[in-house]
Image (tube, grey):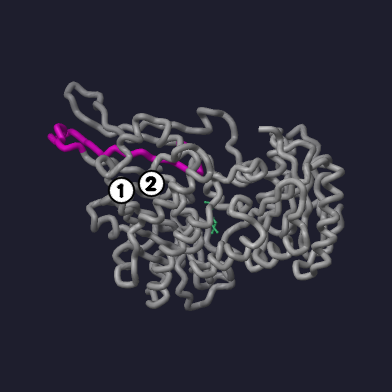
Amino acid sequence: RNTPKAIIVIFGATGDLANRKLYPSLYRLYRNGKLSGNFAVVGVARRPLTNEEFRNNVKDSIAVFKDDLIDHEEFASHFHYNPFDAQHLSHYHDLDAFITKLDKIHDAGGNRLFYMAMAPNFFGPIAANLKSQGLTDNKGWSRLVIEKPFGRNFDTAQQLNEQIGQTFSEEQIYRIDHYLGKQMIQNIEIVRFANAMFEPLWNNQYIANVQITSSEILGVEERGRYYDESGALRDMVQNHILQMISLLAMEPPAKLHPDEVRYEKAKVLRSLRPLDESNVDQYFVRGQYGDGKMNGVQVDSYRSSNGVAENSNTETFVAGKFMIDNFRWAGVPFYIRTGKRMAKKSTEIVVQFKDLPINLYKDKGNVIDPNLLVIRVQPDEGITMHLNAKKTDYETLSTPITMHYDKSIAEEVESPEAYEVLLNDCLNGDSTSFVHSEEVSLSWNFVDQISKAWAAKKADFPNYASGTNGPKAADELLAADGFHWWDID
Ligand code: BG6
């Protein structure tokens, strides 16, 4: 890949996402030679900042990289501020002229990347104005990056797709799901499709169930207002969790092309066994944290958080069972659980293989566990295989053993941040790790049935204490099928 040329326009340039994720990611791309001199960032937001103030913000956000040889001042000189009111059409004209000017200075090839790092109600109107005011009539490419939430249900997601679709074609739209930028999520595909040991077994003949756990220690912190309207189902399951399921369950794509991969992922979503209000409770469990102890410190309940209604019916935990009714997966449950204020911060995928037809090692002294393939997404990154082998003894006794691959030890390089990977892909026009509109629609379509069922019935909240792994019903969900969660450290 040649280093891309572009003017990157960030709407919401003074916000949390820009400061915490986007500037450090751009910096690391620059430091690692993935961005050359031919780029500039236009920071767009309401606040009247000077260029100097803006660049100071950018420098603050990259201050942690102080040991690098890169001159932070020089990097920050690529950043320009443009105060902006999204409702003023004249501001779009000024922005257009500004981008054109910077393009000349930086020789950016006439390419424009518009990044919406702001409240979602602006996505549609800004996209429309970009077109009507001629900002997308540039001579190079133009791309739109948008953040979640992509709507809050099927209908609003459709509306948003239609709105932005008036200006940008599907190929130009890059919908971010930051889980798709994580190294071990990207690894799912390689583990599956580059190993003769796994792909032949990757089906309902050999796999008993798949488990995905994405747990967090933090509560809602300062995001109560957003979260209370959203809940864990919309915040995590509709996007991150369903994306992981798609990657784990998809058929091998014909080639590694964005359309092929995303087509296969969408097919998984189309094969999900649909739920309705009458059976949601058999498949999904919701929870909300009460107070409790985290690391010995007493913490408050969800309902007493800032911005949260004191009788809130919003779930901070979801466990569920997805059935994929196709030839490959018929009968294999995909269990998921995700929540706030759980015992630890971790994302892990466990593939549990079926037991062998006969167990020769069932006499006293033998221990046999099912084979597991564990993909450790975070905090540590790696793969663990759980096998059975001979115990050191005079007799032939079996015992469970593990084989570990630790990414950081094996490669001795620091993993790039998800945003860094995704920004790099977008600048290079690779949308494989971005979400297609069809995936958005299909996943909302599924999730909406659960939301509807839950909205119709008040929950008995809070039902799990902070610092635990969710309500008991989450364990019962698996127990009913003769399984249990593998809590693996
Ligand atoms: C975000 C959610 O999309 O993902 C947050 O809005 C959640 O509520 C976060 O905390 C989890 O991401 P990660 O990368 O920390 O697992």
Q: Residue placed at 73% from the left, 45% from the top?
A: 62
| Mark 2 neighbour density, 10 Å: few (under 14) some (14–19) many (20 or more) | many
Considering only vertical position in the picture, is 20 above or below 449? above
Q: The disc labelled 2 sits on which kind of residue?
A: Ala
Whether residue 292 appears in this view of the structure is: no
The C terminus - image quarter: top left
Total numbered badges shown on the rendered structure: 2
Residue 414 picture location, percent across and down: 59, 35
Residue 406 picture location, percent across and down: 47, 33
Indicate the quadrant where residue 98 lies. Answer: bottom right
* Residue bounds of the magenta highlight: 356-382
Q: Residue placed at 78% from the left, 65% from the top?
A: 46
| Mark 1 neighbour density, 10 Å: few (under 14) some (14–19) many (20 or more) | many
Considering only vertical position in the picture, is 290 above or below 216? below
The residue that label 1 is drawn on is 329
Determine contact: label 1, label 2, CB under 8 Å: yes
Q: The disc labelled 1 sits on which kind of residue?
A: Trp
Q: Is residue 314 left or right of residue 278?
A: right
Whether residue 329 appears in this view of the structure is: yes
| Front residue of 429 and 22 | 429
Q: Name the mark on residue 133.
A: none
The N terminus - image quarter: top right
| Front residue of 434 and 163 | 163
Q: Is mark 2 within 8 Å of ligand 1?
A: no
Distance (Cα) linking label 1 and label 2: 8 Å
For label 1, the SS is loop
The residue that label 2 is drawn on is 249
